[in-house]
Image (spheres, rainbow, N blue to C red):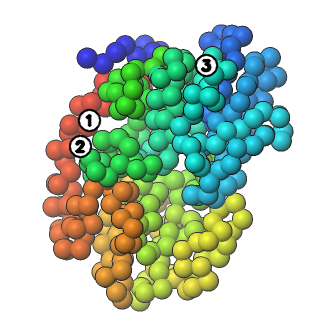
Amino acid sequence: MAPPVSGQSEVPDSEVAPVKPGIYDFERLLSLIGDARVAVVSNHTGSIEGVHIVDSLLSSGIQVAKVFAPEHGFRGDRPDGEKIEDGIDLKTGVPVISLYGKNKKPSKESLKDIDVVLFDIQDVGARFYTYLSSLHYVMQACSEQGIPLIVADRPNPNIHYIDGPVLKEGFKSFVGLHPVPIVYGMTIGEYALMLNGEGWHEAEACDLTVLPCRNYERTIAYELPIKPSPNLPTMESVYLYPSLCLFEGTKVSVGRGTSEPFTIIGEPGNKSGDFVFIPEPKEGASMNPKHQGATCQGYDLSSFISEPAEISQLDLNWLVRMFEETDDRTDFFLENGYFDKLAGTDQLRKDVIDGVEMDTIRKGWQKDLEKFEAIRVKYLIYKD
């Protein structure tokens, strides 16, 4: 039996506009924190009208003792995969502790002077986006240390569908820790409720409060006011990300090192594509992009998406197409097993290699999706 979940009774009023992330309920946040010493888990997306939540808390007299920084760093200016070091935020003087380096979980020592933790990060609704794993370890640490956790909810731009293989045991990694599909159709606040209720953070249920978004429904297309990470600079890239991130486990480039990441695909061995690009180092985004300096041939996918409603499932056609068009299929999937970690299973890779029909591939994960949806529905805050 799942424990009671905070905030589920506070369903937003859909007739009032505009949509506001949970952090905009600032007065309630201040009342929850009071005179407690707070640690903030956030990055550049944790803001109110362009003012970072840390700055707003400090100006309101709140004791912000430290910041925990996920992938891309506290100010969101570090490339994908680059380790983040501990330090001091130059603007505020607040200590910053990395959750994307040698430690991915707040230590007992780092939490010894903390009374409450606030988590506020924009998610994009794909299982392999690493902020979910940071949430996992923050919840685990809060549970173990008996520290209340506040999650300020934010709309999910890919909330309108659920699809992809559900992660299997044996394929857990920092790009996937939970038995959920690639696209899970939940806000990060709802996801936190699910981790707590199902015990998927591998600890006792923590003292969790979710600050719901205001005026939000699942049918609302939400335009992100800030790019969520360096290589997702446009809404087109955000919508294509769930389908294209699988290419990160192949020899195909998704445009890192160009001005159009996650809207273009290509590799030197493709001879059929009608689009070419050359990846080059980009400060703050990709310093060592795949196929650096080489001409990649492939496709510009930006013209295939103008509205989020146009995407109702993962698009595997491009994965199959690039596999069929490469000059050497033996090295299409990288030997490090990263593709299987992203997919959450080795079955998808095997199916692509074996030329399995698309409908058959999709049927292979339908029963798991149905099981997931039966779990998911228990934690939904917002109306369809």
Q: Which residue is mark 3?
A: 116
Callout 3: 10 Å neighbours few (<14), some, many (20+)? Answer: many
Q: Is residue 129 left or right of residue 116?
A: left
Task: State how far apart marks 1 and 2 are (Cα).
Answer: 6 Å
Give the quarter of the figure containing the N terminus: top left
Q: Earlier in the sequence, mark 3 or mark 2?
A: 3
Marks 3 and 2 close (CB-CB < 8 Å): no
Element under disc 2: helix
Q: Residue at x 26, y 61 (%)?
A: 346
Q: Is residue 128 left or right of residue 110?
A: left
Element under disc 3: strand
- Residue kind at label 3, given as amino acid type: Val
Callout 1: 10 Å neighbours few (<14), some, many (20+)? Answer: some
Marks 1 and 2 close (CB-CB < 8 Å): yes
Instruction: Give above or below for 177 relative to 255.
Output: above
Residue 154 visible to the viewer? no
* Front residue of 187 and 160: 187
Question: Residue 313 appears at what percent x and percent y?
Answer: 32, 53
Mark whose residue sits in front, 3 or 2: 3
Q: Residue at x 49, y 73 (%)?
A: 253
Q: Which residue is mark 2?
A: 369
Q: Quadrant of residue 271?
A: bottom left
Instruction: Give above or below for 156 relative to 312.
Output: above
Q: Which residue is mark 1?
A: 373
Question: Residue 74 appears at what percent x and percent y?
Answer: 69, 43
Q: Residue at x 37, y 13 (%)?
A: 4
- Residue kind at label 1, given as amino acid type: Glu
Instruction: Give above or below for 228 relative to 326.
Output: above
* Front residue of 4 and 110: 110
Mark whose residue sits in front, 3 or 1: 3
